[in-house]
Image (spheres, helix red, strand yellow):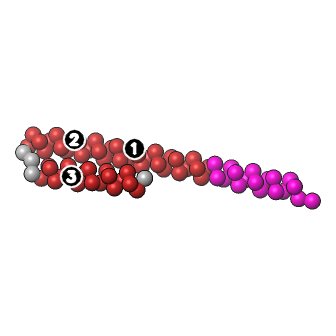
Amino acid sequence: MIEIVKIGVDVLVSLLDKWWNAGADERAALEKRTLEGIQVMRGEQKIAHEEIAARDTETRRILAEAKKNAEDTKP
């Protein structure tokens, strides 16, 4: 995920640099692309958080099952 964010930041910096040196019509188009890029980054971040939450849930389930099995095998 860190690499995705780094690439996203590099792209946004590039777009902002182009915007700074562009005319009015070009600026409007670059602003639109920049906003779209931010939305994509947020979407990827949300997916990453959902994946982490799913792994945490799975880990908790596995630990609870292991604890139950350990209790069941106690003499």
Q: Name the residue that disc number 2 marks.
A: 32
Secondary structure category for the residue under label 1: helix
Q: Give x and y (percent) for residue 40.
A: 34, 43
Amino acid carrying mark 2 in the image: Lys
Quadrant assignment, res 36:
top left
Secondary structure category for the residue under label 3: helix
Q: Earlier in the sequence, mark 1 or mark 3?
A: 3
Magenta span: chief secondary structure? helix
- Residue furthest out toward the bottom: 75
Per the model, the C-alpha gap separating discs 1 and 3 is 20 Å
Q: Is residue 64 left or right of residue 31?
A: right
- Whether residue 46 is in magenta: the answer is no
Q: Nearer the viewer, mark 2 or mark 3?
A: 3
Secondary structure category for the residue under label 2: helix
In front here: 2 or 40? 2
Q: Nearer the viewer, mark 1 or mark 3?
A: 3
- Whether residue 65 is in magenta: the answer is yes
Numbered circle sitting on residue 18: none
Around disc 3, counting alpha carbons within 10 Å, would you say few (fewer than 14), some (14 to 19), or many (20 or more)? few
Q: Is residue 50 left or right of residue 21?
A: right
Which contiguous range is marked in magenta? Answer: 58-75
Q: Give x and y (percent) for residue 42.
A: 37, 47
Is residue 75 shown above or below 31? below
Q: Name the residue that disc number 1 marks.
A: 43
Numbered circle sitting on residue 14: 3
The residue drawn where x is 34% and y is 55% is 6
Per the model, the C-alpha gap separating discs 2 and 3 is 14 Å
